[in-house]
Amino acid sequence: MPGKREYEMKRFWTGTLAAIVVTCATALSAAPLKLQPANPQPSGLKPGLAVRYAYPVDVRTLVEASSALKIKSERGRPLAGLDHRDTNEGDITLTSKRSEHVVAGINGYVHFAKPGIHSIDFLTNDGLRATIGGQVVGKFDGRQTCDSTVMSEVEVPSAGWYKLDILYFQRFGTACLHMRMGPQGKRPSWMPDKAFGH
């Protein structure tokens, strides 16, 4: 007859094994996010992305950023794309009028040249929520130096244009905003400006 210590060890290992199985099953079942192509596909797009700016007294979260855009916003000069390197402190954020306390509502389309499974991430300073083809593919709700979001695996069912919407904010200090993408199993690279239209 097993002793109490042996029984406790068996229970511990059984519980540990069950937790590992559940974790592995969850990871394996996490299917790529299926993106929906724009329907109908747009034509006659202008290069880059449209943007609206808000200039709140302060902004610390995506909820506050969204509210600021609803209260008062103004159209900004379009962005050439999503390759905005980390600024020096005091430099203007994106194409806005200020360096700090800036909220941007960015929209347009991104073009995927090939169907298949792709990895997407963003570098952002500070907050970001990025939606492509109806799926949230990048999110960070807070303040950080120029750093990456969690990588998203996406399924692109067909080559073409996909709707893009980004909510972004910059609070203090420097600012950056980049998008990277690569085929499954390959290192993501910067998205070229020519991939965007509005």
Image (cartoon, rainbow, N blue to C red):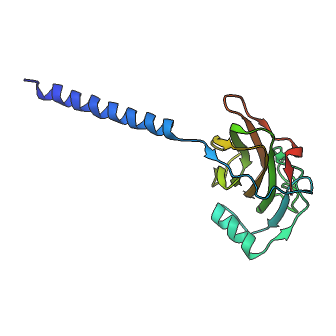
Instruction: Tell which of 18 and 147 is nearer to you.
Output: 18
Residue 167 on image: x %, y %: 72, 59
Q: Quadrant of residue 20?
A: top left
Q: On screen, 46 above or below 18?
A: below
Instruction: Tell which of 16 and 72 is nearer to you.
Output: 16
Residue closest to the far bottom: 71
Q: Quadrant of residue 170?
A: bottom right
**Can the viewer see residue 48 in this picture?**
yes
Residue 138 on image: x %, y %: 67, 49
Instruction: Tell which of 31 and 150 is nearer to you.
Output: 31
Instruction: Tell which of 35 and 150 is nearer to you.
Output: 35
* Residue plotted at (85% across, 50% down): 196
Residue 182 on image: x %, y %: 73, 35
Q: On screen, 125 above or below 198?
A: above
In the picture, which quadrant includes the N terminus?
Answer: top left
Residue 116 on image: x %, y %: 70, 37
In the rendered structure, the answer to whether residue 157 lies left or right of residue 111 reads: left
Q: On screen, 161 above or below 192?
A: below
* Residue plotted at (49% across, 39% down): 29
**Can the viewer see residue 100 in this picture?**
no
Task: Please count the marks in the image.
Answer: 0
* Residue plotted at (80% across, 71% down): 73
In the picture, which quadrant includes the C terminus?
Answer: bottom right
